[in-house]
Amino acid sequence: MKRFISFLLVCFTVLGISSGGAMAITYDEAMDTMDYIEIQPHACRYLASYMAWTARDASGVLRVSFTVVATSRQPNVGVTQIAVQRWNGTSWVTVRSYFSATTPVMMGSNNSIHSASITHNGTVGGEYRALVTIFSGSAASNGQRMVTTNSTVI
């Protein structure tokens, strides 16, 4: 099943590049389904497409994954910040933020595509989502977008 999911992610990425659009998808491991949560028009000359989603890892932790595709080779491609939020019953509260400066796996350099994931140890039974800041370009000229992922119970 994981091979099939990987195949679908590659297809969505290629589709996003060829259509000039950006999309975010979700994968619910417990339900074994994929859902679209956001489709955005190509709005930046540095970003071709991007996806971000959460899932419960096999070890029971939250996994925040992403794929960022630039329009061409860029000095930096990836994610600058991931804010993990927990539902407290009435609103989403940020419980931890991860930054590319301290979590190097979040940012690739001198590439046109970067894909990775981070894990977060949350409370079992808690519902989590992530606010992911997508980035492509350099300090002088860049494209930046924010994606809100699906929610996942761990």
Image (tube, rainbow, N blue to C red):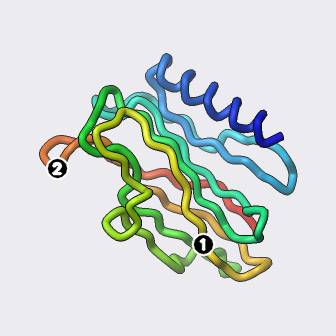
Give the answer, above or below, for where 56 lies relative to 135: below
Q: Is residue 77 left or right of residue 4?
A: left
Could you say where residue 97 lies in the image, as x and y percent from the top left?
45, 73
Give the answer, above or below, for where 11 lies relative to 58: above
Q: Secondary structure at mark 1?
A: strand
- Near mark 1 (Cα within 10 A), the count class, few <14, some 14-19 or many ≥20, is some
Q: Residue at x 70, y 58 (%)?
A: 55
Give the answer, above or below, for where 76 lies relative to 150: above
Name the amino acid type tagged 1. Answer: His
Could you say where residue 72 lies in the image, as x and y percent from the top left?
31, 27
Choose top left, top right, bottom left or bottom right for residue 120.
bottom right
Q: How many marks?
A: 2
Name the amino acid type tagged 2. Answer: Ala
Q: Earlier in the sequence, mark 2 or mark 1?
A: 1
Q: Residue pushed farthest left?
A: 140
Q: Residue at x 58, y 53 (%)?
A: 65
Q: Secondary structure at mark 2?
A: loop
Give the alpha-carbon distance from disc 2 to disc 1, as whole Å: 28 Å
Label drawn at residue 139: 2
Could you say where residue 108 lies in the image, as x and y percent from the top left?
36, 47
The residue lying toward the viewer, choosing from 116 and 39, is 116
- Near mark 2 (Cα within 10 A), the count class, few <14, some 14-19 or many ≥20, is few
The residue pinned by badge 1 equals 120
Could you say where residue 32 lies in the image, as x and y percent from the top left?
85, 47
Label drawn at residue 106: none
